[in-house]
Each structure stands twice: as structure tokens, then as C-alpha cells.
Image (cartoon, rainbow, N blue to C red):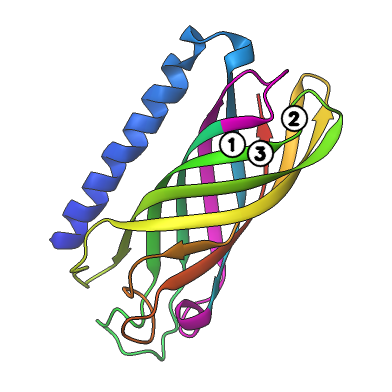
Amino acid sequence: MHTERSFAGLSSVGSALALLLITAPVLTAQDLERSIAIGAAVPVGSVGTNRSMGPLLRGGVTLGDRQRRHVRLRLDLEGSWLQGDSLASSGSWRGGTLAAISGFASMVVGATSEEPSAPYFVLGLGIQRLAIAGVTNPYGATLAGRIGAGVHFRVGQRTLFAEVVPTLSATDFGTTSDFSAGTVIPLVIGMRF
């Protein structure tokens, strides 16, 4: 029951991002870029002990003049699923498939999106909601931080990108040891438009 409420709350976050993506055309084209990305979430450290790499989906918007600004604000909603080890204790937060829904506000620093190809850096803070079926998360939504890098390539009117942005969760939920923050490394490819 608690897990159903957790996922219901997460769907409202997804609805908010969808609304932002739909209403975003109110801003001028130079002030806004939408993005979608797919990839893999690679659990490391105490999160990776009982879980394997899983799929990751991301959608977001980047605000600021893409032709002149070298520092822009990016808002992302990201979901990942890490398959649990069947040998880990069932009904425990140390085993089981870990689902994460995250919302991040990040500063993107680097070349403008109009350059043919260029690297950039990402520094962000966000809120994460972690869930494991049949297990109550006593912490609810927690803080998370990320820092990483990417590279983009212009292809016609679109921008393709690849990123590696390690994410540290401020919770031990889903880890194998108490008081150990969870770390996942998202590897993504995507498109801005």
C-alpha cells in the first residue's frame, strides 16, 4: 500500500514535467531547449552490491539563451530501475529492484549549444524518491547531488549529446550498509530540440 502511494506521488512529478514540456513554447526558442535521453544507470559501491545495471529515462528543459550563454539552468526529471539480486534477503531494502524517480536543477557550464561540438560540465542538486516493492522507505524524498560532464554535437537543427553524471543520494535506503550514501552513475545519450 505504501509503495502504491509512493509511485502515485512520483507520477504527479512526471505530470508536472510533462506540463512544463508542453507549456514551454511560451518562452522564445532561444531561451529554451527541451531534451530527452535514454541510457543505463550503473550502481556502484554499496548500491551495486545486490543490484545490477538498469535502464534510465530522462526528460528536461534547459533555460537561457543557447546562442550566447555559457552558463544555463537545466531542469530534469529522471527515472531508473536497478534489478535486485534474487539471492539477497527478500522483503529487505538491501535486495529487491530499486526504482528511483529524481528531479534535478543543474547548472550547465560550457560552450553554447550552437557550436558544432563541444564539452560541457553539469553540477546539480535534486530530490529523489526511492522505492522497493514490498518495502517501506522510512526516509521519503531525500536530497541528491550530481557532478559530471558531457559532450554535444550539432546535427542540423538538433543537438545530440552524451553524458556521464555520477549521482550521490543522501540516504542509505537501497544500500547494503547503514549510514552509507548510495551512488549511481547514469550513462546517457540524448537529443535537445
**Residue situated in front as seen by the camera: 169 or 21:** 169
How packed mark 1 is, by other alpha carbons closer than 10 Å (few <14, some 14-19, many 20 or more), is: many
Residue at 21%, 61% in the rendered image: 3
Q: Marks 3 and 2: CB-CB under 8 Å?
A: no
Per the image, the residue denoted by label 3 is 109
Q: CA distance from mark 3 to mark 1?
A: 19 Å
Q: Quadrant of residue 34?
A: top right
Q: Position of residue 164 (x, y in %)?
A: 66, 56
Q: Nearer the viewer, mark 3 or mark 2?
A: 3
Mark seen at residue 36: 1
Per the image, the residue denoted by label 2 is 159
Answer whether residue 164 is visible to the viewer in this image: no
Residue type for callout 1 = Ile
Q: Position of residue 84 (x, y in %)?
A: 43, 77
Q: Which of the marked residues, 3 or 2, is nearer the chain's N terminus?
A: 3
Residue at 38%, 89% in the rendered image: 88
* Magenta segment: 45-72
